[in-house]
Amino acid sequence: MVGSVDVLAHDSSINGTMKQWPEDFSSMTIMRDHVTLTIGENGIGNGVVQNGTENGERKIVLGRNIHTTCLEVTEPDIDDEVTGEREAYMAGVLAKYKKSLTERTNYHLGYPYNLNFDYDALSQLQHFSINNLGDPFIESNYGVHSRQFEVGVLDWFARLWELEKDEYWGYITNCGTEGNLHGILVGREVFPDGILYASQESHYSVFKAARMYRMECVKINTLWSGEIDCDDFKAKLLCHKDKPAIVNVNIGTTVKGAVDDLDLVIKKLEEAGFSQDRFYIHCDGALFGLMLPFVKRAPKISFKKPIGSVSVSGHKFVGCPMPCGVQITRLEHVNALSRNVEYLASRDATIMGSRNGHAPIFLWYSLNMKGYRGFQKEVQKCLRNAHYFKDRLVDAGIGAMLNELSSTVVFERPHDEGFVHKWQLACQGNVAHVVVMPNVTIEKLDDFLNELVQKRAVWFRDGNCQPYCIASDVGQENCLCALHR
Ligand SMILES: Cc1ncc(COP(=O)(O)O)c(C=O)c1O
């Protein structure tokens, strides 16, 4: 029987043969499958997936699914229940998986996820299928929900962003992307012929929204900091004065953590002749929506200003173990896209149907445990650590940039993809970044830096290869390549 339930892994990318699941299920096994994307003009990967191509790079082919190290689902044997072998096998797989997750968690620096949390108190709830389908504010017929927690969380965020209880509407989304899809949809419903304006460093979900909703979209240039270039914004507004403006404002861009100047965006709209009844602003706060309120001198995100919606990811700074997010908009806007659904005995104004009912409880738990003061302390620690890390990079002769309001440190892309994958860095062009979250300690940053310095000594030893020039990404003053040093 054991033979039939051996853990199998497909590696059909090479020759379609089946292999034993590796003994130690180590992260390095997974790293073998890493992929380097070649992005085409239109933002779509256009390469070819291969294992072990030149330079150790792998590229992606569209239209072909690659099943590397996949854990096959196998049919239980008749006598499995008696022998207990399947249970033992499953327990073994999960134990190995848990070990690999622990290891990968320790080596994670590139994505803005706070991996520091303790939700043991909530484990008792995993036995329930909690689903918040429908409108958070309307009791539906499905009773196993967590709407009371959801509304508590929404109230907290509405207060943070200064919108009265009876003036806001919102819901707990599946992620920041869903928040953007919703915010831009609300803007489109308010202004059906509106044009979407977004800086070129906006998250890809913003441009996806434009494609999904078939909206005209105007990309705005950015400064080297990653912030929207408001002069270019105004110039482009003036070219389209006949149509209302739906504007995505970044509260932390994905790659550089740049914060668009909301007040200046509003000023440019006014200067271009757009009165408040002719524009809608969605603030994409996926990354820093919860950090910015606690940063001194930061521009204030507030519904006292003429904005239409704000979204934030819940698995980023808050540190939820599952993807989720929060979306807050004005109640007056949401009626435009709501429909009554008899089957639910509720109102449909969300992007998704079924909604994760566990997520609001995790958010609620975290907000209660930390409170405004707890988040403030964590934000301060992250900013301090980010500054420390940036200074150490520069001291080591590595070009780096850190935006004033950000904990995203941008630096020269490491030359070894294995190293990039070990530390799970996010890279774009010649730069990589580390996002300093509450779980990223000084010790971890030191370990990373020491390893990077050692690796660089090897990469650049015989002068065959040089550090990348990153002046066009982060400005000449932050670049330490041979030319700009
Ligand atoms: C600026 C920005 N907006 C939106 C998103 C999407 O968030 P999520 O991954 O929660 O869908 C991200 C993700 O990193 C982001 O950086």
Image (cartoon, rainbow, N blue to C red):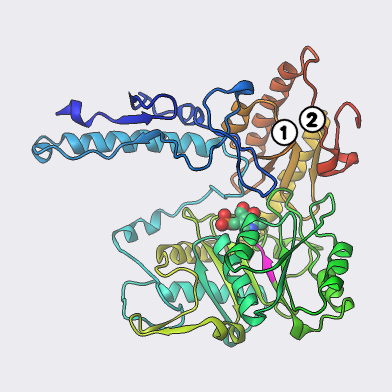
Marks 1 & 2, CB-CB < 8 Å contact: yes
Name the amino acid, label 2. Answer: Tyr
Q: Is mark 1 within 8 Å of ligand 1?
A: no
Residue 468 tag number? 2
Q: Position of residue 378 (x, y in %)?
A: 64, 54
Question: 10 Å neighbourhood of mark 1: few (<14), some, or many (≥20)?
Answer: many
Q: Position of residue 137 (x, y in %)?
A: 46, 82
Q: In the image, is residue 284 part of the stretch drawn in magenta? A: yes
Residue 482 tag number? none
Q: On the picture, is 124 further left or further right than 413?
A: left
Task: Examine the image and state in which quarter residue 443 appears.
Answer: top right
Q: Quadrant of ligand 1?
A: bottom right
Q: In the image, is residue 150 part of the stretch drawn in magenta? A: no
Q: On the picture, is 126 further left or further right than 115?
A: left
- In-front residue for pair 195/86: 195
Question: 10 Å neighbourhood of mark 2: few (<14), some, or many (≥20)?
Answer: many
Tell me which residue sits at (79%, 52%) in the image: 226
Magenta segment boundaries in residue numbering: 282-286
In the rendered image, the vertical position of residue 309 relative to residue 63, given as above or below: below
In the rendered image, the vertical position of residue 32 relative to residue 382, given as above or below: above
